[in-house]
Image (cartoon, helix red, strand yellow):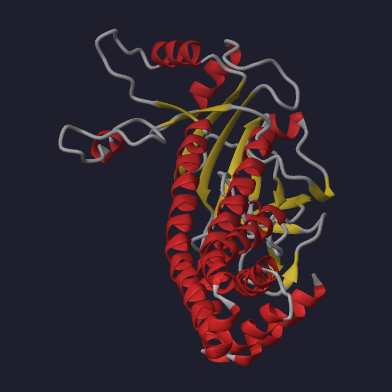
Amino acid sequence: MLAVLAQALKELRADRFRTRLSLAGVAVGIFSIVAALTLVDAVRRSVAEGFSAYGGDVLFVDREPLEPDLDEDGRFRWWAYAQRPAVSWREYRYLAERGAAAPGGAAGGAAFSEIAFAGYGASCTEVAGNWRLLVNAPLAAGRGFTERELLDGAPVVIVGSEVEARKGVPIRVGEALWIDGSRYEVIGIFAKVGMNTVCTVDVDRARLLPCRPSRGPWLRSSILLAGADEAKVRALMRECRRLTPLQEDNFALNRLSFLLDEMNDLFKQVARLGWIVGLFSLLVGGFGIANMLFVSVEERRPQIGICRALGARRRVIERQFLGEAAVLSVLGGAVGVLVVQGILLLLRFFSDLLPAFLPLKAIAAGLAVSLLLGLLFGVFPARHAARLHPVDLIKG
């Protein structure tokens, strides 16, 4: 085996131009496949982490639906949603008092959130109830809100790891943070979580306050209900808003599981596109390998003839050329994998969404496909070389 490998590397070095062309074709194909698999794996993992952060399937009561609602002409009905009333604190209390959500616990209960302007273009998120339904990130320092602080709208705040007391100075627990001219005491700091594809709050820049219904203006308000029955919530919301049986809902009930289904479809499309582009490139690389080996057979006819005359069997000749094809294709696959790894390391400095290293299944898939490609396109030139008659080879 080592002898075949050494001979294959020697022959490939002898014709570097054709070797590089064949390597390029294989490398581009493997790059497309491995990059697609890596992207799908990274985003799927980020989505899974985002969903697990909510502790289950949380029902959101909002003004607009997550799923696009199109009219007969295929247009998004934004004008209809703009006229709807925003979800209010009174409605949150109405649902909570009537048991719309599962009782208590870290994974149950109800919560209310409002995103409000906080001066200089910044925003803060006001919460009430089980605020962990909105942000379940761990705390790096300090503590969370107490029930009394939430009920009283106390001047306390939990911030993300990237919030600064002043430019260039990280904030610490116990320090003051001024929001709209009011002083808030920092009681907790979230651990850095990086980029997340399923999150209603940018945790690293978050500023969470106990809700004060009288404050505004609001950018968005939502009611979060864990373990809720959608039919019951719809009936309670219609009752609270005094809608008649003939009136349509002027609110939306959203579950993040809809996003998961949509993103799973997107994952499949991206993976399929990567395989299609990769296979076309691999076909080009495979034909390049076959052409290179056929040319190599013609150039080495005397050498093959002498080997056959000295007693070398056909399978030895076949094994030699198959070894060259396999080594060439695997080297091309390794180049493609290394290029993807280099790009990942570069992107890692700008985003936490993609991993620093390739998943093993992507590496295994890339190298396996490249090896199969080499054997598939190398079998015909190898058999052609093995079936040539020794006398004709020596004469030629």
Above-or-below relation of 76 to 129: below
Query: Residue at image x 52%, y 59%?
Result: 119
Residue that extends furthest to the left in the rendered view of this protein: 73
Above-or-below relation of 3 to 52: below
Left or right: 222, with 242 as reference point: right
Above-or-below relation of 391 to 110: below
Q: Position of residue 240 (x, y in %)?
A: 43, 14
Left or right: 333, with 77 as reference point: right
Left or right: 244, with 394 as reference point: left
Query: Residue at image x 36%, y 30%?
Result: 85
Q: Nearer the viewer, residue 104 or 166?
A: 104
Q: Position of residue 383 (x, y in %)?
A: 56, 67
Q: Nearer the viewer, residue 46 or 171?
A: 46
Q: Quadrant of the N terminus?
A: bottom right
Q: Nearer the viewer, residue 168 or 281?
A: 281
Q: Position of residue 251 (x, y in %)?
A: 38, 26
Answer yes or no: is residue 300 visible.
Answer: no
How many badges with numbers are in the image? 0
Q: Nearer the viewer, residue 101 or 324?
A: 324
Query: Residue at image x 60%, y 11%?
Result: 99
Residue that extends furthest to the top in the rendered view of this protein: 245
Q: Position of residue 396 (x, y in %)?
A: 51, 89
Answer yes or no: is residue 84 visible.
Answer: yes
